[in-house]
Image (cartoon, coloured by chain):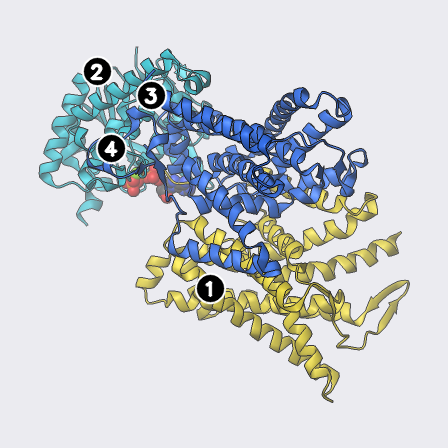
Amino acid sequence: MSLLQIEGLTHFFGGLKAVSDFNLELSAGEVVGLIGPNGAGKTTVFNLITGVYKPSAGHIRFEGQELVGLQSCQIISMGIARTFQTIRLFRDLTVLDNVRLGHFAQARYGIRDALMRSGKFRDEEKRIRDKGMELLEAFNLARYAHTQAKALPYGEQRRLEIARALSSNPRLLLLDEPAAGMNPREIDELLERIAWLKDEFDLTIFLIEHQMRVVMGICEHITVLDFGETIAVGAPREIQTNPRVLEAYLGKEVS
Amino acid sequence: MGLKSRMTLVLVFLGFVLCILIERSGLLSAYILQISMYVGINIILTLSLNLVNGYMGEFSVGHAGFMAIGAYVSSIITVRVFHNQMGPFVFPLAVIVAGIVTAATSFVVAFPSFRTRGDYLAIVTLAFNMIVKSVLENIDALGGPRGFMGMGRLTNLVNVYAWCLVTIFVVRNLVYSNFGRAVLSIREDEVASNLVSVNTRQMKIMVFLIAAFFAGVAGALFAHVMQFINPRSFAIQKSTDILVMVYLGGIGSIFGSVLGATVYTVLLELLRPLGVWRWVVGPIMLVILMICRPTGIMGLKELTGLIPREERVLGKKEETDVVTASN
Amino acid sequence: MIIILMQQMLNGLQLGSVYALIALGYTMVYGILRLINFAHGDIFMISCYFGFFAAIAFLSNAIPTWLTFIATMMVSMLLTALVAVLIERVAYKPLRLAPRVSAVITALGIGLFLENFTLATLGPTPRGMPALLPNVNYRLGALSLSSVQILIIIISIVLMILLDRVVQKTMTGMAMRAVSYDKATASVMGVPVDRIISTTFAIGSAVAGAGGVLYSLAYPIINPYMGVRIGWWAFIAAVIGGIGNVRGAMLGAYILAFVEVFTPMVLPSSTYRDFVAFTVLLIVLVVRPTGLMGRVTAQKV
Ligand SMILES: Nc1ncnc2c1ncn2[C@@H]1O[C@H](COP(=O)(O)OP(=O)(O)OP(=O)(O)O)[C@@H](O)[C@H]1O
Ligand SMILES: [Mg+2]
């Protein structure tokens, strides 16, 4: 069975049709790309999946369960996590707090435990803390654990965003232009990391990318959007030579 | 139990003993006793508003509305229901009931906060404050604009001290938990907060409930110091007083709220000899402080002693007495 | 019945005009600085005092009444603008980069200061504004109309139209909108941001100053606390209309004035007035979280 199934997803912003009849099937373990020129509606697709906006029409099912109409936090706790195109860390919180927040839905203690500092509270807090530190270790951020997120260098902030997304234990990870603002060396590093992530955390990855090199390198399937319309679907090689894509996407990039 | 927590217990106990001594011995004048109680009540109010404005990052400007509800409910209980009998036994109960009733009204503000935020939510809280005042003015059974009286002087220093401790205890333990981190994340970025699985609606309801509860408690204590309340005591001016104490002390800091409430209350008393000029000098000092130190006295920092040990930042920062509150 | 209704309509129009003049100051400052200038109500109060003293001074000389009136208006507008710009420069400008609430708290402080400074220096006794203009009552059928009432409505509307033109059509207005949209970019584009902000304060307060004189002609009792209630009401008007929106503020002001005027006709006690006004406000905000004419900005993610 497919992990994520999107059918006829359509969204209007006022009169603007930002996404039109978008369809997608994601199987567990895949890495799938979503590309398209500026304003094509890519981020909007992510926003619709994660419940930021309610779609004008269409269905989104995650492991067979309908997501449309659910609140964002419910969707996230079902096992979907995402990053943002422009960094949206909790800037004044510490790096450790940023990655501890993903545990919100999973923490097994109530307000009474927190107020009374019960044994359950202590155990859970320790678990959350250890998990957080583990994650930071894995992302090479442990030494920043007690630094405010806003004090990190740009590259580290991007890494932290991914780490934070993983803190809620997702099975599906949505990455919105993870390579934005990176130099070629950093991009290589990122590609490695994504491949490693996928195996280490048993993830399915759906990513938006602007830079062809990134998508071509790691994606098994690619969907191409232009003005909200799906203009091509296929393997990277087919996409690269698809005339409509060249015209809509690469053509624009060249000019 | 560690040495540190045992010391805390001893300190708390000594505090109680001191309160009782002061009260019994007549060592301090009635005036100073009264001011001390105001300080305590203001600490409760300030902490409770800090939860909403400082930790959660909303801008509530109608906290006196909650206070009014607590004040009236408790007064009805002690005066109308129990006719001022069994005061010392009834009063603690009345305070708790007042807190609970006030908390229940917080939904009026909590629900709009799902959709409305920032300055517009501020207006919702303002409207709440004005509506409470206006309703009280129109209930003749409660004295209408003339006010409500007949309460015994049931609030004493021990009462106030105990409630201050409860408030500090609750806020501190809440803040340094998963819930507290979630509340802080709402302040930082509400959308992102939702998208890392924080149930922001639930958190908002929780924060408003708790904040309103303590505002109600403070109102109840206030009513039984003053022994006379009227709707005007809970006008927007009262709310702005509380606001000033929060930002004077510093947002997101428990110790800041304690300081802010104390400094503000005591300073205004010290300025009393100035007569009408007191309210000219006071605001000027406030403005100067805001310009020189826009984040208040504590400026987002917390007193180390209030931070749970495992949350303290180790290393060189430990030397200083304060560390970043957002831990 | 119809007559009473019409009469109240007129009263509402008069009151709404004054509210609108004050609400404009709130909305303009908010639009440009995202600052709820809680001192604005007290700036209005100050302007009433300026008007009062100017009127006293001019009346003692033998100049024609209409000239006295115009001079009083001018003096009040000018001095009020001056005070506002001074406040902006001294108290708000240093806080431009500070957390937003620090400026709001400062505004609260300034408001308190203005109130109590006035109280301390001029005392609590209310002053009666002298009648600057002969108040003629016209009768329109059963309807009674005073010349002051007509004057207030006309002057207010003219001022509002003028202001709306300034914001929409002039270079200054364009610069204001640019600064309100994005200060950093505006600055890079060569807009003198500081000067535009001061200009905004000046215009907003001058208009409130005009409102002050007109108000004290209609309700000629001036005291140090008069700014509090009117300030809040004007503020609510600005919010109902969608704060930051000049036309919205005018709309909100008239709505609120009608609520104020008509509530006592339906509900017995005048204290219900506040209750109704704030309930209207609450409902508007729950239904339209950014006010009637405010931009609905879906947050971009
Ligand atoms: N909240 C919103 N309100 C109105 N229009 C919006 C909103 N969000 C996006 N849009 C519009 O919808 C269209 C698609 O936007 P979207 O952000 O999904 O594009 P994108 O493919 O992610 O582009 P980019 O590569 O620039 O990130 C654009 O025209 C955009 O202006
Ligand atoms: Mg995008």
Query: In the rendered image, is residue B179 in sight?
Result: no
Residue A211 position within the rendered picture, expressed as x and y whole percent measured from the top left: 18, 38
Q: Compared with residue A3, is residue C210 higher up or lower down, i.e. above or below?
A: below
Residue at 42 percent across and 30 percent down: it is B183
- The amino acid at mark 2 is Asp
Where residue A82 appears, as percent x and y from the top left, is 30, 28
The residue identified by callout 4 is: A146
**In 3D space, how far apart are the residues under numbered discs 4 and 2 (Cα atoms)?**
28 Å
Which of the chains bears the disc numbered 3?
A: A
Q: Specify the chain shown as cyan.
A: A
Label 1 vs label 4: CA separation?
39 Å
Q: What element carries label 3?
A: helix
- Answer yes or no: are tags 3 and 1 on the same subunit: no
- Chain C's shade in the image? yellow
Q: Mark 4 lies on which chain?
A: A
Most extreme residue toward the top, as rendered?
A1
Report the chain shown in blue: B
Q: Tell me how far mark 4 sits from mark 3, CA to CA.
A: 18 Å
Q: Mark 3 points at which residue?
A: A103
Which residue is label 1 attached to?
C88
Q: Are marks 3 and 2 on the same chain?
A: yes
